[in-house]
Amino acid sequence: QDVATSTATLVEFNLEDYDSASAWNTSTHRFTPQVAGWYQFNGQITLNTGSTACVLQAGLYKNGTEVRWSQQHSGGQAIDHTLQVTSQIEVNGSSDYIDIRVWQNHGSTIGIVERTNKVTFFEGFLVRAT
């Protein structure tokens, strides 16, 4: 998946490893739990910036509003850069949804690294029902 410069881009996870509660929607790329409570969300996004120095951000969003983010400066190193973001977020169990987005200011479009070794992922699970 490509990420345009200076745009918060929804990360599109089209496959599921495990979803016992059918909370993940592979079309909207949203996690919509059906049990109210506190959930733990963990995301990891790996980007290839080439040798251009830039700022990279990954954020967890609840109903379209950013609630937690992480940031990294690539330093101009021609390696893959990995961002991790994690948070416990309370959801109502009916309409609240969580997604993950990435932002970068590289100056041009860069790609999310997607490999079989799962360097880019998103997960959520119930910690405590309310």
Image: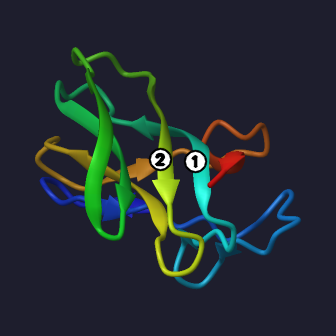
Q: Please state the horizontal and vertical placement of residue 46, each as a whole percent of the image.
A: 49, 37
How many numbered callouts? 2
Q: Please state the horizontal and vertical placement of residue 14, each as a whole percent of the image.
A: 66, 71
Query: Which label's residue is closer to the chain start, 2 or 1?
Result: 1
Residue drawn at point x = 46 percent, y = 72 percent: 96
Question: What amino acid is labelled 1 in the image?
Answer: Trp
In the image as oriented, which residue stretches furthest toward the front? Answer: 130
Give above or below for 80 relative to 57: above
> Pointers 2 and 1 in contact (CB under 8 A)?
yes
Give above or below for 103 relative to 21: above
Residue drawn at point x = 78 percent, y = 75 percent: 22
**Quarter occupied by residue 52:** top left
Residue drawn at point x = 50 percent, y = 61 percent: 91
Q: Please state the horizontal and vertical placement of residue 42, each as a whole percent of the image.
A: 58, 38
Residue under numbered circle 1: 38
Give the side of residue 22 with respect to residue 74, left or right: right
Name the foreground residue: 71 vs 40. Answer: 40
Is the residue marked by circle 1 packed among few (<14), some (14-19), or many (20+) residues within 10 Å? Answer: some
C-alpha separation, residue under disc 2 versus residue under disc 1: 6 Å
Give the side of residue 125 with respect to residue 80, left or right: right
Residue under numbered circle 2: 89
Name the foreground residue: 117 vs 95. Answer: 95
